[in-house]
Amino acid sequence: MKLVAAGLGGLLVSLAPVAVGDNQRVVGAFSEATLAGWEEEVFAGRTDYVLVEAPGKGTVLHAQCSDAASGLWRRLEVDLRETPVLEWSWRVDRTFSDIDETVRAGDDYPARVYVVVDGGWRRWRTRAINYVWASELPGGADWPNAYASQAHMVAVRSGAPDEAGVWRHESRNVRKDFARYHDREVDRIDAVAIMTDCDDTGGEAEAWYGDIRFTASSQD
């Protein structure tokens, strides 16, 4: 069972406030040592999500799983006409070996960040993009989620040796990505989620997440 396959529309009932300022929307203020607004969703055992101090990074969110799958949701509305660019940083020390990420048996990722457009009572209209740190598929690859076709997977990073153990900063234009991967023009997203999971492979995974925010344009 995965986050994208558990009735996305039914989870998005209320909207939480989100910090606003200088053309940005802060979704995850982990550097301020807070998880305010985030909710847990458990599917197959629990991934441990805790705030920790990371050398040179300050406070970050640490995720660790062992044959488990659970995620953290932030229910909110972000206007993509004003702030279309999603930015975050993350780190993994290792990825999975010898898996096929396009099928259910290999649908595990040491780190992923979701953006969701809620279909409301028309759940079939719910759409999601999963920005993942892939293990076998190369960076830049994309494919339908193995559990739910409404979600599309995008490999932002992959398990190359020079990527492991290094903090990476990411920037994605979510509005453009929905047009590209879902052939849909969207003006807002309704939720963001984080997930480190390892239940399908029965293995272990560990990741660290930095702050998450939406901005008017990339800060790179």
Image (cartoon, grey):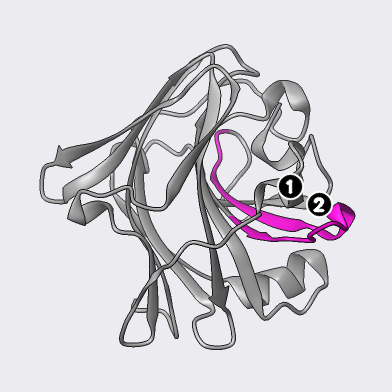
Looking at the image, which residue is at 74% across and 36% down?
A: 6
In which quadrant of the rendered view does residue 217 lie? bottom left
Identity of the residue furthest to the front in this view: 14
Residue 150 placement (x, y as % from top left): 81, 51
Residue 4 visible in the current orientation: yes
Regarding mark 2 in the picture, which secondary structure is present there?
loop
The quarter of the image holding the C terminus is bottom left
The part of the chain drawn in magenta is 115-135
In which quadrant of the rendered view does residue 62 lie? top left
218 left or right, relative to 7: left
Choose between 46 and 60: the one closer to the eye.
46
Looking at the image, which residue is at 56% across and 40% down?
A: 134
Looking at the image, which residue is at 21% across and 54% down?
A: 31
Is residue 44 rendered magenta in the image? no
Q: Callout 1 environment at 10 Å: few (<14), some (14 to 19), or many (20+)?
A: some
Is residue 120 rendered magenta in the image? yes
The residue to which callout 1 is attached is 10
The residue to which callout 2 is attached is 150
Residue type (three-letter) at the residue carrying disc 1: Gly
Q: Are marks 2 and 1 in contact (CB under 8 Å)?
A: no
Choose between 28 and 169: the one closer to the eye.
28
Residue 151 placement (x, y as % from top left): 75, 50
101 left or right, relative to 59: right
Residue type (three-letter) at the residue carrying disc 2: Gln
